Image (cartoon, rainbow, N blue to C red):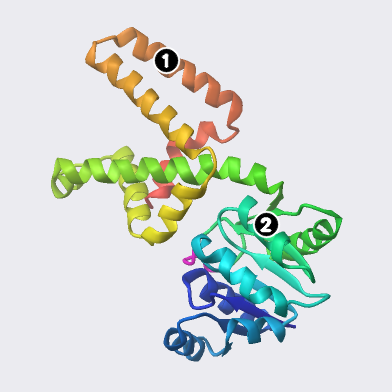
Amino acid sequence: MKIAIVGGYGNMGQWFARFLSKEGKKVVISGRDQARLRETAGRLGVECASNEQAVAGSDAVILSVPINSFESVVKEIAPRTHSGQYIFDITSIKAKPVEVMHKYIKQGTILGIHPMFGPGAEGVKGQRFVLTPTNAQEQALADKAKDYLEGKGAKVELMKPEEHDEIMSIVLGLSHFIALVSADTLSTLGKLKESQQVSGTTYRTLLTLAEGVISEDPDFYSSLQMHLPGLVNIEKLFKAKAGEWAGLVNEGKRQEFIDRMKALRTTFEKEDPGFAAAYKNMYRLIGE
């Protein structure tokens, strides 16, 4: 089986090229930066070609391109897709990319996939994937993909593209927003070195989150923040809640602070099966 990875010199494109090559698949990568494309292909030991050539000669296609250029790339490759071909996108947003693929791709079967991990993952075992089929044909492909991935030890969820994006506004959008604001606050305070010398578990967990986000690609994170639906309202809610808690501290309302914290604990105990292990998990997160 030959698989084309459009945008194959990006971090996730390279990850899938390595993974699929190890799985015995023949891989060809493509992209618009020819110098970068040739260098990456040589280093990975895979073929390289233009987007159109790679798609036309492959049994399956993985679209690993930024959301901002997604539609133009799909429009470019669509005439080269063919019957019996599988076309996957691995963007972190699903509703718009799936809509775009339906608009332009008239042959083959598409499927939106979101790998819930970054290019630092060693393999798929223990990793999460979300698949977003929208019709019977895509459902059949999703079932095949689910069986394959779970056979490799991955965890797979199926949901509608719109449902995926709503959840990702919380799972990714809110957590990234908190990390960025925390990093900006810590930077402005100007005590990074001093605070690390006397930091406890909670602070090191916060610092791990903040540094983990700001060390990654700003283009990727800006795309998520600008395109995830409903995220603006979630961030407004977060700012309002931050104001409420700051108000309790500013006004010295100790008992109300305690009561609200207890109420939150009760909610999380009911809703989160792993809540009891939360404190221990912090230590695991920072490697202690």
Residue 211: give x, y in percent of width and height: 32, 53
Number of residue marks? 2
Q: Is residue 71 magenta?
A: no
Which residues fall within the magenta stretch? 118-122
Residue linked to disc 2: 98
Left or right of 121 on screen, residue 82: right
Residue linked to disc 1: 260
When asked about the image quadrant of residue 16, the answer is: bottom right
Q: In this view of the protein, which residue sits in the foreground, 124 or 185?
A: 185
Of badges 1 and 2, nearer the viewer stands: 2
Residue at screen point 33% across, 38% down: 202
Q: Is residue 154 visible?
A: no
Residue 245: give x, y in percent of width and height: 33, 20
The reply to whether dot 1 and dot 2 touch (C-beta < 8 Å) is: no
Pick the quarter of the image with the N terminus.
bottom right
Query: Hey, what amino acid is under mark 1?
Result: Arg
Is the stretch drawn in magenta largely helix, strand or loop?
Answer: loop
Q: In this view of the protein, which residue sits in the foreground, 26 or 243?
A: 243
Element marked by disc 1: helix
